[in-house]
Amino acid sequence: MSEDLASQTCTPCRGGVPPLTPDEAEALLPQAPGWDLVDGATRLERRFSFANFAEALAFVDRVGQLAEEQGHHPEISFGWGHATVSWRTKKIKGLHRNDFIMAVRSGELVG
């Protein structure tokens, strides 16, 4: 992995490729600080904290814009002072390198 994940873009995933194994996901996880592997290493998740509802909403909007640009969409829940973002490639029912790229890039949108 000579190129860091934050500088990469998603490649189309049409399905039919195997999801990352738990070991492969664990190997990529250090490049996504603050993110956790959940559901048997089939999903990445991170909870973000904010000072108020408006900041949480603005963050969710930025993540949504990034997701639209990249054609890869997370599950997001949010409320007053918090947002939880979850990445998983639904077509393969697990994690793809794209999920790590998007996790890193969405984490950079805080602030």
Image (cartoon, rainbow, N blue to C red):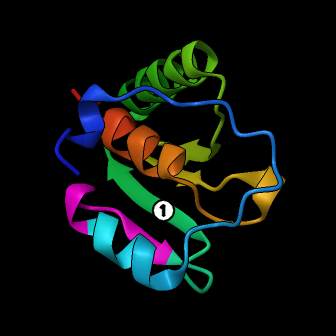
Who's the residue at 77% across and 59% down the image? 92
Kindly indicate the quadrant of the structure image that contains residue 18.
bottom right
Q: Is residue 51 visible?
A: no
Quadrant for the C terminus, please: top left
Where in the figure is residue 83, as x and y percent of width and height?
A: 47, 46
Q: Is residue 26 placed above or below 76 in the rendered structure? A: below
Q: Which of the pair 81/21 is nearer the observer?
A: 21
- Residue 52 in the image: x percent, y percent? 35, 35
Q: What stretch is highlighted in magenta?
A: 30-37
Left or right side of 45 for 69? right
Horizontal side, residue 26 vs residue 61: left or right: left
Image-based side of 69 in relation to 28, left or right:
right
Which residue, given by chain and number where applicable, does mark 1 sit on? 45
Query: Can residue 61 be seen from the camera position used here?
Result: yes
Query: Compared with residue 33, is residue 56 higher up or lower down, i.e. above or below?
Result: above
Is 8 inside the magenta-drawn segment? no
Could you tell me the amino acid type at mark 1? Glu
User: Could you classify mark 1 by the number of other residues whose Cα lies within 10 Å: few (under 14), some (14-19), or many (20 or more)?
Assistant: many
Q: Quadrant of residue 95?
A: bottom right
